[in-house]
Amino acid sequence: MAVLSSPNRDSAAYPLQSLFVPFPFVCFTLALITDIAFWQSGGNLMWQNFSSWLLFAGLVFGAIGILAGLLDLVRRRTRPLRPGLLPIFLYLVVLALALLNSFVHAGDGWTAVVPYGLLLSAVTFVMALVAAIVSARKYARLAWRI
């Protein structure tokens, strides 16, 4: 009879948070793009609605990612792939900025996006890039065993 599992069960662990964490980054990037489209279109409210929904979706998946990360803290098999404190802190900062951005986008018309909503979307995008770079460094070291 063939055994389909790895003899070393620790190496077969996959963190649950890895399934949900990329969604907020994609949603917040698209929110920046739709904010730019709103600004360039002269205030077409469709783009503001898209931005609001993308921010909401990113925050929902961010909360699910936090819950999955807490489950991963309990799972012993995901210990080597746990993120460090700096990536976790940066991820929480990105979610806090996105929540603030969502409150700004809840306003009405042009002033809900330009200038503060657009600025917050850009800052959220830059912080998401920084968080991705900081967290990717650890996984690259694990992959190359450095």
Image (cartoon, rainbow, N blue to C red):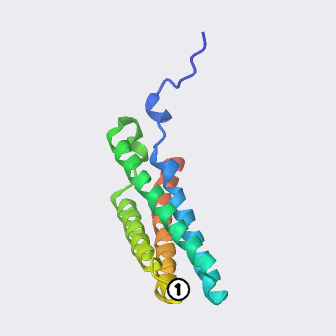
Q: Is residue 45 visible?
A: yes
Residue 83: % across, % down: 40, 53
Reading the image, the residue beneath label 1 is: 109
- Label 1: which secondary element: helix
Q: Is residue 55 above or below residue 104?
A: above
Viewer can see residue 146: no
Give neighbour class at mark 1: few <14, some 14-19, many 20+ (Cα, 10 Å).
few
Front in this rendered view, residue 52 or 3: 52
Q: Is residue 113 above or below residue 7?
A: below
Task: Determine the residue positioned at 35% across, 64% down.
Answer: 89
Q: Nearer the viewer, residue 127 or 42?
A: 42
State whether residue 23 is above or below residue 13: below
Q: Amino acid at mark 1?
A: Gly
Q: Quadrant of residue 33?
A: bottom right
Tell whether 17 sits left or right of 27: left
**Residue sitting at 65 percent across and 88 percent down?**
40
Residue 11 placement (x, y as % from top left):
48, 35
On the image, which quarter does residue 80 sit in? top left
Where is residue 54 shown, x and y percent of the image?
54, 66
Residue drawn at x 46%, y 72% as measured from the top left: 127
Residue at the far right: name it: 41
